[in-house]
Amino acid sequence: MPSDLPAEPKAVSFHFPAWVPWTALAAAVLALAWAALQWMTLRTELATLRIELQLAQLDLKDAQQRREADRILGQYRRDPATLKIFLLSSPHAGSPSALAAVAWNPGTSEGVLVAQNLPPPAPGQVYRLWAIDPQHPHPVVAGVIDVDPQTGAAHGQFKPSQPLPAAARFQVSLERQGGVPAPEGPVVLASP
């Protein structure tokens, strides 16, 4: 008896050519290499952007300090008698050739410091600027000096913690980090 059912399809066997898996593997390796290259490129760009940000922040700080120095020195241009200049050098014979200058305005009790050849402080230590005023029994802290570790240069404006219209001298000492009420460490620069 003939059947009206369709004949079963015959299974056709299909085999990938031998080169297909190798091509797929090569494509995967290339994709992985491209992704790794993109990742390294992005890391490099991120590092470059971080450096550019740090440089921009340093430029901004420098511009702010220069503007403040110009403001302080602008008063000197209007009234030269108000500004006093102090030269600071090492009080010890045979010390490094560190030097500093302070432009001081006694009317506003603020100033500008420029220093050179200061060795970087040891970890946990900072350079501190002190104003010596005969009206005060102890030196008055005027600020912390940030030294460029590569050049030994420092510059910036400062304003002591209290008015000092009669400041007669300035000195720089090496102190422990965190602040001290009076000089404890060695004096590395002083005005006569």
Image (spheres, helix red, strand yellow):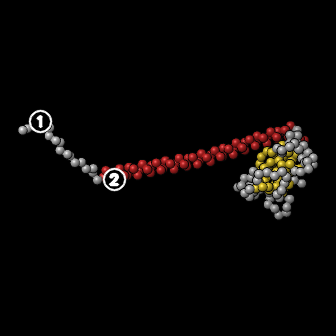
Q: Residue furthest front?
A: 1
The quadrant holding residue 175 is bottom right
Residue hosting label 2: 22
Side of 31 where 87 appears, left or right: right
Which of the image's four quarters has the N terminus?
A: top left
Which of the image's four quarters has the C terminus?
A: bottom right
Kindly report which numbered mark, 1 or 2, lies closer to the viewer in this rendering.
1
- Residue 35 coordinates in the image, percent (x, y): 46, 48
State whether residue 140 appears in this view: yes
The quadrant holding residue 152 is bottom right
Q: Residue furthest left?
A: 1
The quadrant holding residue 65 is top right
Q: Which mark is residue 34?
A: none
Q: Which numbered disc, 1 or 2, marks the residue that appears first in the sequence?
A: 1
Q: What residue is at 57 percent from the left and 46 percent from the top?
A: 46
**Amino acid on which the number 2 mark rests in the picture:** Trp
Query: How many C-alpha atoms fall within 10 Å of the one at disc 2: few (<14), some, or many (≥20)?
Result: few
Q: What residue is at 11 percent from the left and 35 percent from the top?
A: 4
Distance between mark 1 and mark 2 Cα atoms: 47 Å
Side of 24 where 143 appears, left or right: right
Q: Nearer the viewer, residue 51 or 103?
A: 51
Query: Element at badge 1?
Result: loop
Query: How many C-alpha atoms fall within 10 Å of the one at disc 1: few (<14), some, or many (≥20)?
Result: few
Q: Nearer the viewer, residue 69 or 142?
A: 142
Q: What residue is at 72 percent from the left and 57 percent from the top?
A: 123
- Residue 91 coordinates in the image, percent (x, y): 86, 59
Residue hosting label 1: 4
Side of 13 where 121 appears, left or right: right
**Amino acid on which the number 1 mark rests in the picture:** Asp
State whether residue 83 appears in this view: no
Vertical position of residue 152 compared to residue 75: above or below: below
Query: Element at badge 2?
Result: helix
